[in-house]
Amino acid sequence: MQIPDPALVVLVGAAGSGKSTWAAANYRPTEVVSSDALRAVVGSGSADLDASNDAFEVLDLLVTGRTRRGLTVVVDTLGLDAERRAGWAALARKAGLPLVAVVVDTPAATCRARNAGRDRPVPASVLGAQLQRMRDIRRELETEGWEVHVVSGEASAAASAPTSSPG
Ligand code: ATP
Ligand code: MG
């Protein structure tokens, strides 16, 4: 099933699942809004958690501006916060854009191994909680009204390209 375009696309996946890699393979950089990137813009770096509130404020502004113009926007965050998802969904509905959730489904062991090899690994307990949340996420997203697409974070990231070609 092809991902509609334009659309609001919310990525959902644990740390290290491959969300940012998939987004970069399938969308233009200007279409992707990333909480990590914005933490580095408003704070001292992508891992500056004290900058999270400001980063999400900017992210919401970008989602508002793009959806209002009917432009595709890919939200690159963990995607696990139902309240945040509801806010973005409301913006997309107002603009008449489809609500797409891309679940990056990567084996827990792969996420753990990738996390362990990173410069600033997420604490194991935090990653464990994220992986736990992933178990029921699909049903949760469908209940909320999202069109759910599951992609692999192990396969070639370009394998499940949306209808628009990346630029
Ligand atoms: P975070 O939530 O921390 O931002 P993420 O979900 O965005 O993580 P990425 O940064 O995209 O994850 O990927 C994590 C690591 O896994 C990177 O080193 C990346 O190169 C590797 N990776 C991602 N996707 C794939 C893939 N499809 N095949 C092989 N390696 C991948
Ligand atoms: Mg990322």
Image (cartoon, rainbow, N blue to C red):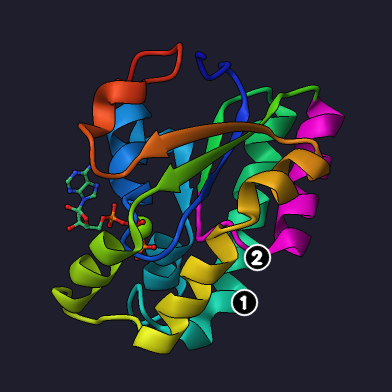
Which residue corresponds to the image point at 64% horizontal and 44% vertical from the top-left? 63
User: In the image shown, does 125 or 135 lie closer to the viewer?
Assistant: 135
Q: Quadrant of the C terminus?
A: top left
Q: On the image, numbered disc 1 is attached to which residue?
A: 53
The image quadrant that residue 145 belongs to is top right
Tell whether 37 sits left or right of 11. Answer: left
Label 2 CA crowd tier, 10 Å (few <14, some 14–19, many 20+): few
Q: How dense is the environment of label 1, judged by Cα within 10 Å: few (below 14), some, or many (20 and up)?
A: few
> Which amino acid is tagged 1?
Asn
In magenta stretch: residue 30 = no
Q: Nearer the viewer, residue 77 or 91?
A: 77
Q: Amino acid at mark 2?
A: Glu
The x, y position of residue 87, in whole percent, is 79, 53
Instruction: Report the front residue among 46 and 152.
Output: 152
**x and y percentages locating residue 65 in the rendered image:** 67, 39
The response on whether ligand 1 sits within 8 Å of label 1 is no
Dividing the image into four quarters, tell me where ligand 1 lies. Answer: bottom left
The answer to whether the residue labelled 1 contacts the one labelled 2, judged by CB atoms less than 8 Å apart, is yes
Considering only vertical position in the picture, is 167 above or below 100?
above
Residue shown at the point (36%, 79%) measured from the top left: 47
Up-down relation of residue 45 to residue 26 (above or below): below
Q: Secondary structure at mark 1?
A: helix
**Whole-percent x, y for residue 57 in the image:** 65, 65
Checking the image for residue 57, the label placed there is 2
What are the residue bounds of the magenta stretch?
76-95
Residue at 33%, 39% in the rendered image:
22
53 displayed left or right of 44 = right
Which picture quadrant has residue 95? top right
- Element assignment for label 2: helix
Q: Is residue 138 left or right of residue 110?
A: right
Give the Cα distance between marks 1 and 2.
Answer: 6 Å
